Each structure stands twice: as C-alpha cells, then as structure tokens.
Amino acid sequence: MQKTQFHREAGQSKLHIIVLAAGTGSRLRPHTENLPKAMIPLPDGQSLLGHTLSLLDKDPLVGDIIIVGGYEYDVLRCYVETQWNGRCRIVFNPDYAAKGPVYSVLRGLEQCPAGCFVAIMNGDTWFSESALRRVTSMAADAAVTTLLFGLHATEPAADDIKILADEGRIQRVGKGIGGAQMISAGCCLLPPRAIARLRRILTSIESGHHPEVETWHEALNHLLEAGETIEFRSLPRDEWQEIDDEGDLAKLAHRMGVCRKSGAI
C-alpha cells in the first residue's frame, strides 16, 4: 500500500489540525466566566488547550494547527499569539453562539489548502499523547478513508454523540440514535477527497439548507449520503476525557494522578 510522505518544510506538512475552541462552557462556570471553555485550567495547572497544543507541537507528523475561536475570543487570541506565535493560527467564528461547531469547522477548513489531510478535534476534550499519536499516524496512509474516533459504550449518556456502525463502517452519527453502542471522542480524520465534499456540505448548511444539522458530527451524515465511507476507530476510555462539568474535571484529576504515578504523562 502506497504511503503519503510527510515532511516539515517551512513548518508545513500534509496533516493540518483544526481545534474547535469557540464554546462557552456554561456548565463549567465560574471557570468559564472570563475564559473560553478550551482554556480552563487542568489539575496540573496547564490549560486544556495548552495541553493539546504542547502534544501536537512535538508530533513530527503535524504541520499547520488552526484554532477556531468565538467566545472570549480576545483572551484566546492573546494566548495563542503570545504563547504559540508562529506555530498556530487562530480564526474567528462570529456565529459561535448559534450553530457554533458547524460553522467553526467550515471556518477552519477554509484555512486548509487543497490536497491535505485534516484532523478535526474538539477543544473541550483532553487527549493523552498516545491517543493523539494514534490519530496523526493514520494520516500517513494515503489510502485512508474518513475515520471517526471513539469507544464502544453499552450505555451511552444522553449528551453523547452516538455512532451506529456495521462491522466498523459508520452508518449514522448523532445524539438521538437508538441502539447505538459507540460514542464519539470528538476527533475525526479526513482525507483530501472527503474534505472537499464536507466543505460543500457545510457551505450549503451556512446558506440555509439542512436546518436540522446542529453539530459538526451531524454534518457527517450528509457526507455519508454523498457516498463517502466513514470508518470507526477505537480510542481507549482512559486515553481521552470530554470536559463538560465539574464532575468531568474530577474524573480527569483522578486519571492524571494515576497516569503521573505510572509515568504515562
């Protein structure tokens, strides 16, 4: 199988990362009263976004990193420009309060050149280094299909993005899916062909079509309808944690403590 060659000439590679960081994080107040959700402090004192960027920065397969902001954008922009100047780019989604995630993905894709691989990841999710390396390493396969990462879950929560799949091939994605036994980790890897299709779909949504689409995951259903194959790839439960409320922060604090003792972080 032919492999795509990755190299970092002038800081570029074929893999672009879009980090969605426009959310308000209302369930995390008071932490998010003056901070974007993606910038909440972690138990080790580092911000959630800082943790993600520090791992991506040292990954040799990662080229351009695009951060899409919205809520408390000036705070986010100042952080990126002072701490990550030259390594990351930041763009503004003025519609973050409406269909924020949907338009944030489109704003990010508009920054990506044709012919590149793109990984989209939620900025409110903590990923371990091994989880991110698993995602980025799969972009080195030139024959890769669109991949959505997550885990098997027999009792998904109401707020989880659920995945219905048959032998690893995804059939539908969304919150209101009955019988689903997988959930999304908020991370998706797309090859160039799928990116072009997804951009057209998102542009159509922005123009007023498909009003039922409220999350970027639901836009993937239209990608499936357009003939794109999307496959499920597992990320172990202890390799990622979505941060929505204080309970999630407590779980992460415990996890990071265990990982630190074992030397995994």
Image: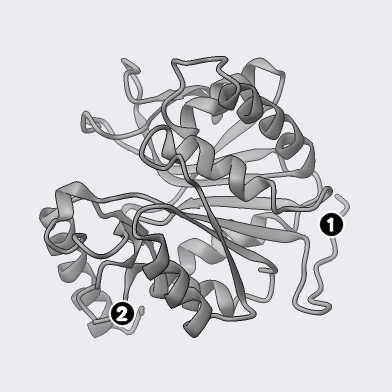
122 lies left or right of 5: left
100 lies left or right of 167: left
Can residue 128 be spotted in the picture? no
Q: Position of residue 100 (x, y in %)?
A: 43, 39
Q: Residue at x 22, y 68 (%)?
A: 255
Which residue is tagged 1?
3
Q: Position of residue 159 (x, y in %)?
A: 25, 33
Give the quadrant of residue 261. bottom left
Q: Residue at x 81, y 73 (%)?
A: 7
Give the quadrant of residue 252. bottom left
Q: Amino acid at mark 1?
A: Lys
Q: Position of residue 56 (x, y in %)?
A: 55, 72
Q: CA distance from mark 1 to mark 2?
A: 36 Å
Q: Secondary structure at mark 2?
A: loop
Q: Amino acid at mark 2?
A: Gln
Q: Residue at x 17, y 62 (%)?
A: 249
First along the sequence among labels 1 and 2: 1
Judge the density around disc 1: few (<14), some (14-19), many (≥20) Cα neighbours within 10 Å: few
- 246 w.r.t. 59: above or below: above
Which residue is tagged 2?
46
Name the image quarter holding the C terminus.
bottom left
Q: Secondary structure at mark 1?
A: loop
Q: Nearer the viewer, mark 1 or mark 2?
A: 2
Q: Position of residue 90 (x, y in %)?
A: 56, 63
Q: Nearer the viewer, residue 114 or 24?
A: 24
